[in-house]
Amino acid sequence: MTQLPLRAQLASALGRSAATLSRMTGRGDGSVIGGRVGLMLEPDLLRQLARDRKLALVSATNGKTTTTRLITSALLELGEVATNVFGANMPAGHVSALSQHKRAPYGVLEVDEKYLPEVLDTTGASVVCLMNLSRDQMDRAAEIWLLAQKWRRALSGKPTHVIANCDDPLVTWGASTAAKVTWVAGGQRWKEDSWCCPECGGPLDRKDADWACRECTFHRPEPQWAVDDDAAIDPQGQRWLLDIQLPGQANRSNAVMALAVADAFGLPVERALPRLREVTSVAGRYTTVERDGRHARLLLAKNPAGWLEAFDVADPQFPIILSVNAQGPDGRDTSWLWDVDYRILRGRPVFITGQRRLDMALRLDVADVPFTLCGTFSEALAMQPPGRVDVIANYTAFQDIRTEFGRAV
């Protein structure tokens, strides 16, 4: 790799020092502060760190942290990979990730949907993975149609190879201006944000996985890759049993997206898939923590689409704890709770906590789901009998629980 200019070297080194100090003092994992320090000293640091690397950017409303982890695991078969393992998905986090692995020839960066155009323009990434778009943090990110439009503009005229989920009409529209697209039939369980055509505004007709606009020519592209229950189907039609350790259909979809990205890097399925099977948890997601004989499995859900996938993973035979906050990273507006169908929890012991537990309590009461209101997560966990319990929490509530267990998960 080309050596960085002296100023960039200094900025990168000071950023790494700041990150190390942050970790040593227990103030954080250093994945943001290191990048901020580096960018303060050299505003063009991200571009310089990205130069001469083969990069993949991963963006979506849900699943981008997990898919980034899966792609990274696969590409380790080729060599060292720089990645924002803690999910710091804005430019400061990208700078920190690339600085920490300054000699890695490959990089896989999770990117916030809103920042994708800026990061793509700055890094010149050769591969972009786009998975889904649905309502999330609308007080910050605005309407998802605007995000899809920004993606279209960012990809137009670029030589970037896009791996995109063709089952999501908004993702398809956002990706369709790219010079090269590999379409993946990754599924779309949550459809409530894509009943209208993003091209003309007309209604979309849906039949099984297929969709098409009733009033214009916009329609679902023919996929090269597909997920079929527990298997991936490659462009040659060969089926590959996924057999990954991460639970749920959404993660099997994430795995197929990862295999398609690995293929774009020249890594065949037979070499990539065993690497995917090694991943057991991602930044605490799906990890089980233990306290006084109670085994709590941690699931993250930040928006209606994410809660739908979490319900798919949660086991109905065990109690469940729901924890909801509304801090900046979560989005201040909790009205999205009313878009989630909680009736699936009927007949199951439900405990609710978090800063916005009263909002959740009202929503469950309207859904006729009995619940127990708890002041803290510790209180909710202590009320469980010994054995398994599922925990679904949104972003900052999830991080609070991880911190309570020493972030060792």
Image (cartoon, rainbow, N blue to C red):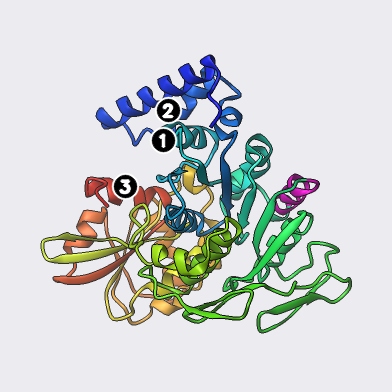
Task: Please tell me the numbered disc located at residue 34.
Answer: 2
Q: Nearer the viewer, residue 182 or 196?
A: 182
Tell me the quarter of the picture where residue 217 sits. bottom right
Tell me the quarter of the picture where residue 377 sits. bottom left
The secondary structure that dominates the magenta segment is helix
300 is higher (above) or lower (below) than 346: above
Q: Which residue is mark 3?
A: 400
Q: Which residues are magenta?
A: 146-157
Residue at (26% x, 32% y) in the render: 26
Q: Position of residue 115 (x, y in %)?
A: 62, 41
Front position among marks 1 and 3: 1
Question: For the residue labelled by badge 3, is the local secondary structure a helix, a strand or a loop?
Answer: helix
Label 2 CA crowd tier, 10 Å (few <14, some 14–19, many 20+): many
Horizontally, residue 263 falls left or right of residue 311, namely right
Kind of residue at badge 2: Gly
Q: Nearer the viewer, residue 11 or 172?
A: 11
Question: For the residue labelled by badge 2, is the local secondary structure a helix, a strand or a loop?
Answer: helix
Horizontally, residue 221 falls left or right of residue 84, namely right
Kind of residue at badge 1: Ser
Front position among marks 2 and 3: 2
Spot the residue most to the right. 216
Asked if the magenta segment contains residue 163, the reply would be: no
Label 1 CA crowd tier, 10 Å (few <14, some 14–19, many 20+): many
Q: Position of residue 164 (x, y in %)?
A: 65, 62
Q: Position of residue 125 (x, y in %)?
A: 63, 44
92 is higher (above) or lower (below) than 212: above
Residue contact between numbered discs 2 and 1, judged by CB atoms under 8 Å: yes
